[in-house]
Amino acid sequence: MMKKRLGALLLCLLLVFSLSSAALAAEGENAIQLSTPEDLLQIGLRPDASFVLTRDIDMAGLDWEPAAFTGKLDGNGHTLYNLNVTRTGGVRADTVDGNDKVYDSVFAGLFSTLIGARVENLTLRGVDIRIQSGEHCFVGGLTGYMKNAEIVNCSVLDARISLVSMCQPEPVNPRTSCNAGVGGIAGFGSGAIRDCTAETVLVFDDQCAANLKVEEFMGGILSCGNADISNCTVTIDGYDACRGYAHNGGLVGMFYLYDKSETLGAITGCSVNGSITFFEDNTDRRAYCQPFVGELLTWTNMSECSQTFTRNELFDYTVKLSPEKCDAPSYTETRQEADCDHWGYTVHSCTVCGHSWRDSFAAPAHVPGEWTVTVPATYETAGRRELTCTLCGQTIAEETIAPHVPGEWVTVAEAGVGRDGLRRLYCADCGEVLDEEIIPGKKNVQSIVLDQTIVNLYYKDELKIGADIYPADAANTVVYWTSSNEKAVIVDTNGTVHAVGRGTSVVTCTSADGYASSQCQVRVDFTLKQWVTMVLLFGWLWY
């Protein structure tokens, strides 16, 4: 009985797996493809759809408005780079502090909010998010807010994420505090963040009214909330000028199961490298700043994590806390061009304090050379050609060359006497020369052979002399006939000799090209009867 139950269970699991795989495959096939900055705007227009990147996208110059998203985005291993964000999104949500006080908040990041969404296989590089807000506000490299969302295999690199909090008391709804935070991946919220990397500069500047106590949160992954965070790597350079209550952590500023209906998250397999420099200008000081979690308000499992972290607390509250270390920086710029495997970027270095940062990223790219035919096409079969990179020699693209379509033979050089000609066969589609042939040159007449060389005729007789031209394929086989003594012999154009008087003549056959000739000796006599007639009529004097 137990074996039957196990077999049935395995069949059910296989069925569920098959259905899930089919559903995921169908979802991937129906995903909207994104390949340009303009395509990305569809995310805001269709927030519940599935999207997939088909290439790296340069977002430089795009006035990006953080989008509220509930669908799925598969980065497909591609990168969005040169992202600039200076405003919060239009969707609001509630956040809480450690005392469960609720704040109606705004958010900024690539997304403003991720609710039930999934973002995977995506890299953000060259991120510059600079928000000034007079409202409760959370900012993250990928999203400002998340609820029951998944962020998997995503990276935020070469990022500066900063928030200037400028809350003021309101007459209608008097404030006694402000809620704000900055996170390398996410600002506030819950869900799962797995296999992610954040290499960020995080900056929080408290410029709120003096009587407001800011609940401030900073984390290399998540600034505040409850999430499963696993196998994430953080490189953090944090700066926090807080006049309220600071909650700073290499991974999470404050870990808190604020929504008791959710499952408590855990932190496993993460590493942190870097530092957070901060002050807390507050007599009721808390000054939370730890390598992993600033304040662990809800105890959770945290295991297999490593850190090289510096907690750098200052007590000079007049110091401006930022990566820039001098009041009058002077920068030099160095351009590193992209190649086949490495990103290009511009390095800005301060000659006074040594602070530097990178921007103006360019994606790795091959430099194409010339197409090379690897398999020539023929009349019957297709060919192949390939395009290689001039830098690394890698094949960038391959193409099929369609079989040639023969056109008409075209004479490109006429044959002449003693001179060969040429004709070619071209492809009717591409014009390539498919074949060529020599047109034999024309030949001169080399000899004329007459069928008679000595002829004896009687007066008024006629005889056709035959002439054979050699070679037979001579260019011009026309011949001319002449008689050296037309009183005795006349010859017509056909070579017929007419005896017109007693005597001798040399009949000559000459080729029209003048290269050959042949002769026939002709003698004309009278017959006996003709002699008698001549004597009777003219006497011996005629003779």
Image (spheres, rainbow, N blue to C red):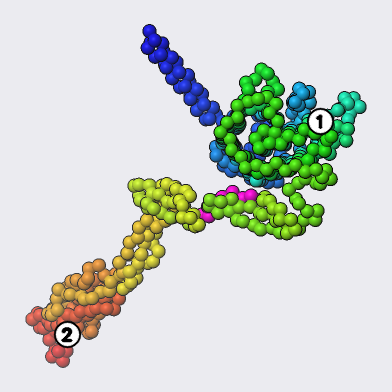
Q: Which residue is mark 2?
A: 504
Q: Is residue 362 magenta?
A: yes
Q: In whole angstroms, how far apart are the C-alphas of marks 1 and 2?
A: 140 Å
Residue at horizontal 50 percent and vertical 22 percent from the top: 20
Q: Is 290 rendered above or below residue 505?
A: above
Q: Quadrant of residue 219?
A: top right
| Camera-side residue of 214 and 463 | 214
| Camera-side residue of 445 and 404 | 404
Q: Which residues are magenta?
A: 360-369
User: Residue 42 appears at what percent x and percent y?
Assistant: 65, 33
Residue sitting farthest toward the top: 1
| Camera-side residue of 343 and 68 | 343
Residue at horizontal 63 percent and vertical 22 percent from the top: 264
| Label 2 residue SS | strand
Q: Is residue 451 magenta?
A: no
Q: Quadrant of residue 509?
A: bottom left
Residue at horizontal 73 percent and vertical 59 percent from the top: 351
Tell me which numbered mark, 1 or 2, is placed earlier along the sequence.
1
Residue at horizontal 80 percent and vertical 56 percent from the top: 328
Three-letter amino acid code of the residue under disc 2 = Thr
User: Residue 321 appears at what percent x and percent y?
Assistant: 77, 45
* Residue 143: mark: none
Instruction: Give the position of the C terminus as an image quadrant.
Output: bottom left
Three-letter amino acid code of the residue under disc 1 = Cys
